[in-house]
Amino acid sequence: PPFPSPPPCLFVLALPNTRRFPWTGPVLYLGELPNSTRLPWHYIPLWAYLTPPACYLVLALIGLYSTLREVPERLAKRDPALALDGLLAGCLFGPWLATLAFHSTLYDGWRHLYFSYPCLLYFSALGLLTAWRITGVAQGLARRASRGLVLGGFALSLSATAYLMIRLHPLQNIYFAYPFCTYMPQMKTGFEM
């Protein structure tokens, strides 16, 4: 049988607890120990930059850019998928903005916002499709070469990520994307692990 969904009021009741979680310990961030309730605005963006594979971030930027660029045209066509793109962009950036607005207690990187990671991957996939579409404009050998570069770069990035996760096992959850992982001694003294 399906699980009953919680009433919407439970979500509203949970918000004050997420806003002011009763923990005020120090957090190792950029080699300093600020209080968990006084972290700078760039705490979440920096963690979100250091940990996902660079390929995901680059493709997500391409996907977000192409989505924003196509908004007027898609509005004119009344494209129903535009609402989904807007919702997912909101789910990607909204939680971070909410942590800023509510001065939420944060610690251990961006783990409180991992639920937004699928939205990042969605825009990464859109970025990959955009890159594929752009490379399709070329003809003949140029087309095959440019598409080979896109797929090869993506495959290389995924392979490097898999290699690092295997190499770091059983500590694969302490993951920093390449090239930051090559500076692990400095990362250990600068960030919570």
Image (cartoon, rainbow, N blue to C red):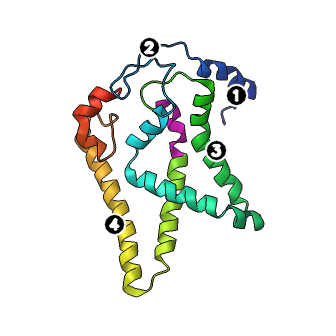
Task: Give the distance between the C-alpha atoms of the residues marked 3 and 4, in whole angstroms.
Answer: 31 Å
Q: Residue at x 35, y 70 (%)?
A: 149
Nearer the observer: mark 1 or 3; the answer is 3
Answer with left or right where residue 12 lies relative to residue 41. Answer: right
First in sequence: mark 1 vs mark 3: 1
Q: Residue at x 62, y 32 (%)?
A: 98
Which amino acid, mark 4?
Gly
Q: Give percent across and percent down for residue 101.
A: 63, 29
Q: Residue at x 36, y 29 (%)?
A: 30
Disc assigned to residue 35: none
Disc assigned to residue 25: 2
The residue singled out by tag 1 in the image is 6
Which amino acid, mark 1?
Pro
The magenta segment is: 111-118
Disc assigned to residue 152: 4
First in sequence: mark 1 vs mark 2: 1
114 w.r.t. 127: above or below: above
Q: Quadrant of the N terminus?
A: top right
Task: Give the distance between the C-alpha atoms of the residues marked 4 and 2, in whole angstroms.
Answer: 44 Å
